Amino acid sequence: MSTVDLGLPRLRRAGTAPSTDHRFAAGPLLDQHGRTARDLRVSLTDRCNLRCHYCMPPEGLPWLERSRVLDDEEVIRLVRLAVRDLGVTEIRFTGGEPLLRKGLEDIVAAVTRLRTPDGTPVSTSLTTNGIGLARRAAGLAAAGLTRVNVSLDTLRADRFARITRRDRHADVLAGLAAATDAGLAPVKVNAVLLRGTNDDEAADLLRWALAHGYRLRFIEQMPLDPHGTWQRDDMVTAEEILAALQREFTLAPRPGSARGAAPAETWDVLRAGARVGDVGVIASVTRPFCGDCDRTRLTADGQVRTCLFSTSETDLRDAMRSGADDATLAATWRAAMWGKLPGHDIDDPDFLHPTRPMSSIGG
Ligand code: SAM
Ligand code: SF4
């Protein structure tokens, strides 16, 4: 397995030295633009068993050396810190493919036992490609996982094999069914539409999701591909997706439909005037929601990222391995979040493509 560096030396390290600034000695994860981070995305691995065109090259990526990846105890320590001292209430495990992480069930069980300072349990979820979920769903539910998001871009096995470069469509469908049986509800499905590949499937996917009780969320393709070849004009926009859905469905904005910090704008789907489900669109590019963002991210190698599109990261792994105590780690995390930029500026001509691809950041 290759151990080539993922370009981190080229990445600006913000606050690599642990923060001792007294302003960051206590409190939640605030930034200078009035936002508070409550939702922590934890990447458990950068590896994956699929090779989705928009995310990974066919040969995979130069994976992180194992010694650079946080071990289970380190992950649990940092999540505990986030919940106990930093105001985090929601944990999402992601990757790469988080089901490839040995010890996932143990991590979920440990995180499930955590309580916020007022005694509230944290909500835990998993974003997964669904491969192997059929075998693992019941165990993950028993470990305390609250729910899953499964990524599925197409209902056609041949297209799935083209998009992901692996013939595993049936495994994903089996994983989704097992998630429902295990009570990992609501089961959400994430779909990326690609022009000329599956952009004719918006309505098919929604019909299928409604029939199975899955909550479908379309995601606009973002400039997080490994080769930096994303083109705005190639992207299927939220507007196009909604127009395609409205040819068959009646969509009504949800009552009081301010989406708050949720990335998806959501519509009720009506049939004969009655609500039969909902559908969401995560329009990070054309309708960015940065002003309400409540996310903070931890990469598999222990770097805090304040945004998917950050060009800088703050190290917690080396600080932790050098003996930093919890108070110092918490202060370092607060200082990193204080510097979170107001937005990602994808539409700005000077937009800088992040050095890490999505699979390495943790989508
Ligand atoms: N492997 C898991 C999966 O596929 O669900 C978790 C990681 S994956 C990076 C998380 C989500 O990011 C998936 O729903 C995937 O479709 C989405 N994603 C990956 N690259 C993307 C891109 N360039 N633009 C938009 N979404 C992307
Ligand atoms: Fe793997 Fe998820 Fe990226 Fe697809 S989107 S290659 S499943 S990490």
Image (cartoon, grey):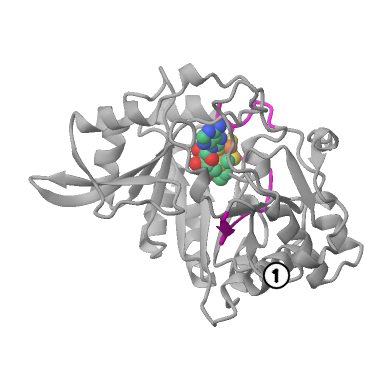
Q: Tell me where the magenta segment starts and ends, as one range.
A: 34-60
Q: Is residue 90 left or right of residue 341?
A: left
Q: Which residue is denoted by mark 1 in the rendering?
A: 81
> Which quarter of the rendered picture does the C terminus lie within?
top right
Q: How dense is the environment of label 1, judged by Cα within 10 Å: few (below 14), some, or many (20 and up)?
A: some
Q: 37 above or below 53?
A: below
Q: Is residue 282 left or right of residue 113?
A: left
Quadrant in which ligand 1 is drawn: top right
Query: Which residue is at a point 67% across and 62% down the rendered structure image?
Result: 103
Q: Quadrant of residue 216?
A: top left
> Which quarter of the rendered picture does the N terminus lie within?
top right
Looking at this view, name the residue that lies furthest to the bottom. Answer: 119
Q: 37 above or below 164?
A: below
Query: The disc labelled 1 sits on which kind of residue?
Result: Leu
Query: Which residue is at a point 28% across and 55% down the rendered structure image?
Result: 256
Q: Quadrant of residue 230?
A: top right
- SS class, disc 1: helix
Query: Which residue is at a point 73% across and 69% down the rendered structure image?
Result: 77
